Image (tube, rainbow, N blue to C red):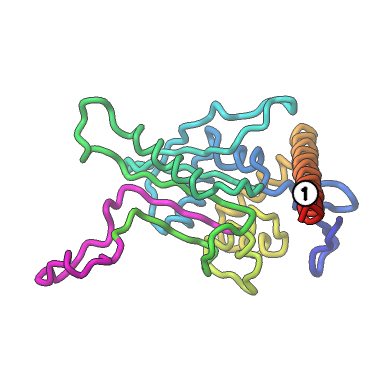
Amino acid sequence: MIEKTKGTTYEKDQGGATLYNGKIVRIPATSDFMFKNLFGVQGKEKNLKGLLQAILKIEIESLEIQNPELQRYHKNDKLGVLDVRAKLSNGTVASIEMQVQDENNIGERTTFYVCRLYINTIEIGENYNETNKTIAIAIINFSYFNRREYHSIAHLKFEECKDKNEIVEDILKESELLTDKLEVHIIDLVKFRKMKEPKGELADWLNLILGNEEEITVASERNEKIAKVNEENKKLSSSQEMQELYWLKQKYIYDENTRISVATKKGEEARTKKGRRNGKRR
């Protein structure tokens, strides 16, 4: 299925790639390998810094990308799960995962990542107070949580006490967080697309990630970092190797969706037959 972009001669295929005269001119950064090459390899620190500042709403002096080994070099390499990891100059550890397919586990999966990263911030013999703040970010191309915002932030928080007999009334102010060292961000691209005119720096970066051409043009005029990443995105997209990886990933997604669809249909047919047999026995 090809969708024409409004007011342009560009088209979009099912995977979100931008086509011009039938040729790919932009592979979206929702593709894990493209996201990795734009934000998760050595030399892309400034790109990642710009994106993280927009997500976390903080100033970042500098950062170190910690996972260059996940770089893919051949189309036949095993398809991996994106895990961009960085250590900020203030010691905070952050990871970003791009998740396109809904595997019905993003809450548990992100919790696992943030806990594993947090454990790795302390060495044997060190004091617990020496652990670094740890942030796990998941950018998802599906809606999973029943939340009204497209950018949700979660912490370990105290709940309201259910038993009034356990409340000490003379405490004037209660703590809200168990700790401020664990933080999760969920960015829902489906909800983002539903917004009429999303504003702000994060919206500009998400338009770039999605490959929204008109919005990227406008954002590039006011943000040099986005303009730079935009040019890198287009240059990488023109590579035959990247295009082969893109088609390989689209085939994988299509085959996986077909497998799930067939399995679901067989399950429904089996339940229907079983229901009929049980009905006849009665």
Please tell me which residue is depicted at 58% across the width and 57% down the height of the picture.
Answer: 144
Q: Position of residue 75 (x, y in %)?
A: 74, 28
The answer to whether residue 18 is visible is no
Q: Which residue is mark 1?
A: 274
Residue closest to the eye, 255 or 57? 255
Helix, strand or loop for disc 1: helix
261 relative position to 42: left or right: right
Classify residue 59 by image quadrant.
bottom left
124 relative position to 22: left or right: left
In reply to whether residue 166 is colored magenta, the answer given is yes
Classify residue 129 by image quadrant.
top left
Q: Residue furthest right?
A: 21
Please tell me which residue is depicted at 59% across the width and 46% down the height of the picture.
Answer: 98
Q: Name the main secondary structure of what is drawn in magenta.
A: loop
- Disc 1 residue type (three-letter): Lys
Q: Residues within 10 Å of mark 1 (few under 14, many from 20)?
A: few
Q: Which stretch did the figure color magenta?
A: 159-188
In the rendered view, tell whether residue 207 sits above or below residue 99: below
Residue closest to the eye, 272 or 7? 272
Q: Position of residue 155 (x, y in %)?
A: 36, 55
- In the rendered image, which quarter contains the C terminus? bottom right
In the rendered view, tell whether residue 39 sits above or below residue 172: above
The answer to whether residue 24 is visible is yes
Q: Position of residue 123 (x, y in %)?
A: 28, 27
- In the rendered image, which quarter contains the N terminus? bottom right
Q: Residue furthest bottom?
A: 196
Residue closest to the eye, 94 or 201? 94
In reply to whether residue 62 is colored magenta, the answer given is no
